[in-house]
Image (cartoon, rainbow, N blue to C red):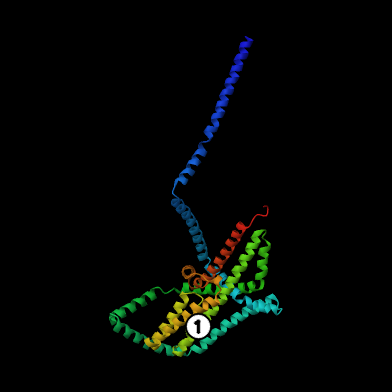
């Protein structure tokens, strides 16, 4: 009986072990359902044509980029006065940096050198404004009479050349006046806009002083907080971006001044009234590449047409075209370095985007921001390529 019970116990134990072993052997099989599902997904993805996979990946990346740009644009619109003030401040700082360095070489304190630089900027702007007003204030009365005569000549030219009657032209002019009257800004909105502009100008001047005074120490403070290769990449990218902004600001100012002088001299020789204000408009328009020069030239031609007639207007148009062609094909490649030049399509997109976001101020600052961003990204990419191509020190 004892032997029989022992045998039965042995058989029971073996059966239990066998059952457990079988269950244990089945357990891994049950756990492989998830990996098989993942493998099936990967196989299904790999089974798609390469073109479909590429389109899916690029579409996903495009959605992420567009969403990021949309968020940045919304923030920029909400903080447009601050963003424009910062952009203008950096632009003026890069433009006036050589003046600051010259004063620092004369062993002036940083605060005094920065204050003198800001005062020099205000003196130049104020002096130009007073000069333009004193030289052209007496011409406004004459211009009003000449404009009336010019508009009448333009009206006669349109009705005699085009299939348009006097009544149709009067109706078109009345519709235009009604549209302009209906879209006129309300006084409250205009007052708010003026307040924002004045606040942005004051903020730009204060920030300009502090950046001229403490810009380099602040940049070194940022670099000291970084370690490893990031410090070298950030230092080089910052230097390249700052050199790009400085070269762009000084080159653009020089080219705009040459355009203004050339077109202004042509208008003076043609005896077009308000030649100096038109030259100043041309100078300011030079800071908005392509579009600004075109608009400024169109304004000069229209004033010449209204004041002096079609013949003088055609001569003014020829002068504008000659000056802009010489500037675009000869002066710009010499003055602007290769690293700050952008494709015209990129410039048009940047100016359009800046105008839609922040109006005229956005058009002014969009191109330098694009140029600096492009150069910084290019520098970071070159660093990464050099790091990938550099042989490992452990080999």
Closest to the observer: 236 or 177? 236
**Where the N terminus falls, by quadrant?**
top right
- Please name the residue that numbered disc 1 is placed on: 260
Closest to the observer: 306 or 27? 27
Viewer can see residue 309? no
Viewer can see residue 298? yes
Q: Residue at x 63, y 62 (%)?
A: 233
Percent of width and height locating residue 163: 28, 80
Percent of width and height locating residue 149: 37, 88
Q: Residue at x 29, y 84 (%)?
A: 160
Label 1 crowd (10 A; few <14 / some 14-19 / many >=20): many
SS type, badge 1:
helix
Percent of width and height locating residue 169: 31, 80
Identity of the residue furthest to the front in this view: 395
- Residue 157 drawn above or below residue 194: below
Closest to the observer: 48 or 306? 48
| Residue 307 figure quarter | bottom left
């Amino acid at each position: 009986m004892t032997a029989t019970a022992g045998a039965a116990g042995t058989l029971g134990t073996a059966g239990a072990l066998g059952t457990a072993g079988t269950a244990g052997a089945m357990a891994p099989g049950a756990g492989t359902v998830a990996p098989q599902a993942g493998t099936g997904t990967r196989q299904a993805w790999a089974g798609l044509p390469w073109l479909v996979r590429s389109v899916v990946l690029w579409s996903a990346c495009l959605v992420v980029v567009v969403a990021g740009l949309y968020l940045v644009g919304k923030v920029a619109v909400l903080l447009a006065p601050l963003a424009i003030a910062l952009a203008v401040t950096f632009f003026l700082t890069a433009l006036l940096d050589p003046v600051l360095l010259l004063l620092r070489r004369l062993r002036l304190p940083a605060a005094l050198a920065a204050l003198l630089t800001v005062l020099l900027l205000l003196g130049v702007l104020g002096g130009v404004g007073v000069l333009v007003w004193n030289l052209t204030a007496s011409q406004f009365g004459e211009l009003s009479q000449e404009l009336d005569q010019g508009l009448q000549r333009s009206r006669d030219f349109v009705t005699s050349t085009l299939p348009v009657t006097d009544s149709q032209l009067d109706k078109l002019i009345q519709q235009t006046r009604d549209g302009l009257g209906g879209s006129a800004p309300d006084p409250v909105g205009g007052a708010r806009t003026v307040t924002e502009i004045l606040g942005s100008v004051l903020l730009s001047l204060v920030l300009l002083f502090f950046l001229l005074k403490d810009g380099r120490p602040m940049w070194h403070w940022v670099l000291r907080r970084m370690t490893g290769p990031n410090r070298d990449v950030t230092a080089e990218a910052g230097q390249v971006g700052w050199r790009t902004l400085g070269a762009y600001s000084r080159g653009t100012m020089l080219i705009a001044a040459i355009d203004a002088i050339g077109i202004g001299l042509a208008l003076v020789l043609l005896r077009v009234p308000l030649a100096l204000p038109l030259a100043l408009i041309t100078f300011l328009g030079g800071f908005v590449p392509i579009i600004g020069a075109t608009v400024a030239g169109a304004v000069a031609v229209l004033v010449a047409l209204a004041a002096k007639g079609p013949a003088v207007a055609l001569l003014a148009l020829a002068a504008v075209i000659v000056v802009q062609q010489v500037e675009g094909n000869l002066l710009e490649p010499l003055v602007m370095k290769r690293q700050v030049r952008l494709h015209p399509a990129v410039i048009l997109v940047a100016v359009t985007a800046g105008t839609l976001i922040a109006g005229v101020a956005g058009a002014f600052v969009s191109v330098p921001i694009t140029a600096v961003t492009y150069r910084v990204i290019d520098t970071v990419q070159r660093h990464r390529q050099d790091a990938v191509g550099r042989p490992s020190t452990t080999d």
